[in-house]
Image (cartoon, rainbow, N blue to C red):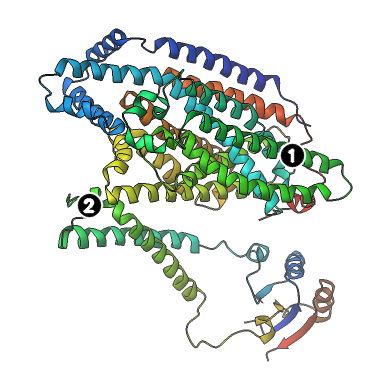
Amino acid sequence: MYTLSSKLKLTAIIFMIVGAIGLVIGFLQAPSNLDDVREMMAAEEHHGETSHAEEGEANFAEAEHGMLLDDEPGRNAEGDHAAEAGAHDTEHLEHKLHQLQNKPWAAIYVAAFFFFMISLGVLAFYALQYASQSGWSPVLFRVMEAISAYIVPGGIIMFVLLVLSGFHLNHLFVWMDPEVVAHDEIIQNKTAYLNVPFFLIRAAIFLAGWFLFRHFLVRNSRRLDEATDNYYFKKNFKLAAGFLVFFLISESIMSWDWIMSLDPHWFSTLFGWYVFSSMFVSGITVIALVSIYLKSRGYLPFVNNSHIHDLAKYMFGISIFWTYLWFSQFMLIWYSNIPEEVVYFISRIENYGLPFFGMVVLNFLFPLLVLMNSDYKRVNWFVVMTGIVILIGHYLDVFNMVMPATVGESWFIGIPEISAVLFFGGLFTFVVFSALTKAPLLAKRNPFIKESEHFHY
Amino acid sequence: MASKVIHAIYNDDDLLLQAVKQVREARYHIGEIYTPMPVHGLDKAMGLAPTRLAITSFLYGVVGFVVAVAMMNFIMIEDWPQDIGGKPSFSFIENMPAFVPIMFELTVFFAAHLMVITFYMRSKLWPFKQAENPDVRTTDDMFLMEIDAANHNVDELTKFLYDTGAAEIKLIDNK
């Protein structure tokens, strides 16, 4: 049995407290009216930002704003620029105000989704082991079960955030604003699907489904420990197969709802797969990190370096799979160059150059070059180092998916962003390691456990 | 080639792997092993030096990547500049996304084909080469281990091999 060390518990709680304080500061720092924005922008200019760059940015923001909301008055205003320069300026300031007010919310949203998707990815990986009746992995089942435990608090937090958006406490989702919809024909045509009640019902169904499947899978796994036959194993096999069908459909729709609808005009048909690959590789990476940590504390004597090798192979392979999907999405849109599609990447490349291309280096080049050699996949510190880089990369991936639509060019990885990661990271650590103490670390009655213990590459 | 060898035939790969370990522990010298399919872990059990084929494969992949870059730059940018995707930039880096599939394919193509050719050359295999298998059954379902018997007591060695689970033991005496 694993016991949660007080040091780890304390670290997690400190992370949560520091994160919570930082988030409060983030909310307090957000401007509440136009004068605050004016002051902030004046201060920024004093810091040496040239007016030319500011101008370019403003023009771009306006163009993006026009395209995003498709508002005719905005375009007319651009026509007689000189006449309505004053009104234009105020409009820009208002735009900036909304972005800065969204910033702490978006920071919470990104971090909450990132840690939630890790546990969801691990649950999918866990179900896959049952459905494929894998022989190598049962020694890691308890680690996977513990990580997937975060799906419940993480999912509830996600739901609360979506409800808050639905009640207009924040403006992350443009299509939830009735005034925007009134002037936007494209969103009007989507209201049969994109409306707040249906949106929340879908989220509730998916979350409830994932919670229930997780609950029964884990319960059967615990009961199998005390069982005399393989009844619960067979039951879990069927349950896992059912879960995977439900998961692939619900995950796809979830990614359209929770992320793609942030840019309500834009769509990509492989978006569900893209988000899935991100959550899958992050989840597998966390399984590897937690296993290596527990092993270093002497808790998993039955996990040998062949198991780590297999996890690292998955990290390597799914990283390349992620890149394949990222590039497929990018290249088709880049090549065809259709304005309403390509605006998605233009706003990312022009305003998010460093995180957008940086994440490709972190998520693709780094794992590719470091984990290519077969022997390096067995060296724990190589796997840990690559794992941390992959996690940072996929945080940035979620960041790039959420931020351009919510805060636009006003992004910055500052106090709210780091605090949100600390807070949810602390909560994640606390929940996962508390869940580890609930059951023996070896699923001893699993029919493949002998094969798994002797697994040798 | 040693003048006197023993051919021990096994009918199971796990049995063979175990026998290889026992034979090496007993300090007998294994000349060669013939198997109908690759046996996982056999090279390590035999104590062969690790293969350098993976390194050559990586280098061939790099060559393929460079060839693709040079080729696409010459064809699409220098020799006959193309307007790609309605974006007439005529610069390699700005048109690079269109070339990525080609870079990928040529990297894989070079790595795979040149690695196989290297493997054939290293194994001294070429078309119409006569098979060296001492027993045709090693192309079907039998595993043959060839052990040097020159400086050993043949009866003792036979007994030892029989105990490791060999199905058939033959003394080959090339005088």
x then y, percent, for residue B109: 40, 66
Please give the residue where the numbered disc 1 appears in the rendered image.
A216
Residue A89, image x, y percentages: 20, 17
Which residue, given by chain and number where applicable, does mark 2 sit on? B92
In this view, A41 is above or below A179: above
Identity, as a three-letter code, of the amino acid under mark 2: Phe
Closer to the camera, B118 or A294?
Answer: A294
Most extreme residue toward the bottom, as rendered? B175
Tag 2, which chain? Answer: B
Crowd around label 2: few <14 · some 14–19 · many ≥20 (10 Å):
some
What is the secondary structure assignment of the residue under circle 2? helix
Using the image as rendered, state which of residue B171 and residue A63 is in the foreground. A63
Q: Is residue A392 left or right of residue B103?
A: right
| Horizontal and vertical percent position of residue B135 | 68, 86
Q: Nearer the viewer, residue B126 or A252?
A: A252
Residue A2 in view in this figure: yes
Q: Position of residue A241 (x, y in %)?
A: 67, 50
